[in-house]
Image (tube, helix red, strand yellow):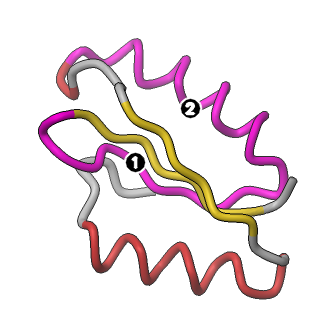
Amino acid sequence: MSGVYGLSNSRGWIYIQAAENVQAALLDQLGKLRLDSGFGAVTGFTFELCEGGRRAARCSRLIEELKPAVKS
């Protein structure tokens, strides 16, 4: 499904991204984040379903508001 997803831990938001396929993007990103131990463990995940035309704007707004550690 298409949407925006975010990864977090007890220190805050780690990553926020828009994706055409949230599940595939999540699995790919988790593999990449494991290679970099500087962010700590991902302990939280949330997503919001969004149509393709709204995804980029919604993602940008969430990044601006939540200020994740990794900029997408």
Left or right, 60 with reference to 42: right
Residue at 59% x, 86% y: name it: 57
What residue is disc 2 on? 29
Q: Which residues are magenta?
A: 10-37
Q: At label 1, which amino acid type do we have? A: Tyr
Which image quadrant is residue 71 in?
bottom left
Q: Residue 6 — which label?
A: none
> What number of labels is visible?
2
Dot 2 amino acid type: Gln
Mark nearer the N terminus (2 vs 1): 1
The residue that label 1 is drawn on is 15
**Residue 34 within the segment the image draws in magenta:** yes
Q: Residue at x 57, y 81 (%)?
A: 58
Instruction: Kindly indicate the quadrant of the structure image that contains residue 25.
Output: top right
Q: Residue 42's image quarter?
A: top left
Vertical side of 5 occupied by 25: above or below? above
Horizontal arrangement in the rendering, residue 42 relative to residue 18 (left or right): left
Q: Secondary structure at mark 1?
A: strand
Q: Is residue 37 left or right of residue 71?
A: left
Residue at 64 percent of width and 78 percent of height: 56
Instruction: Answer above or below: position of 51 versus 12.
Output: below
- State the SS at label 2: helix
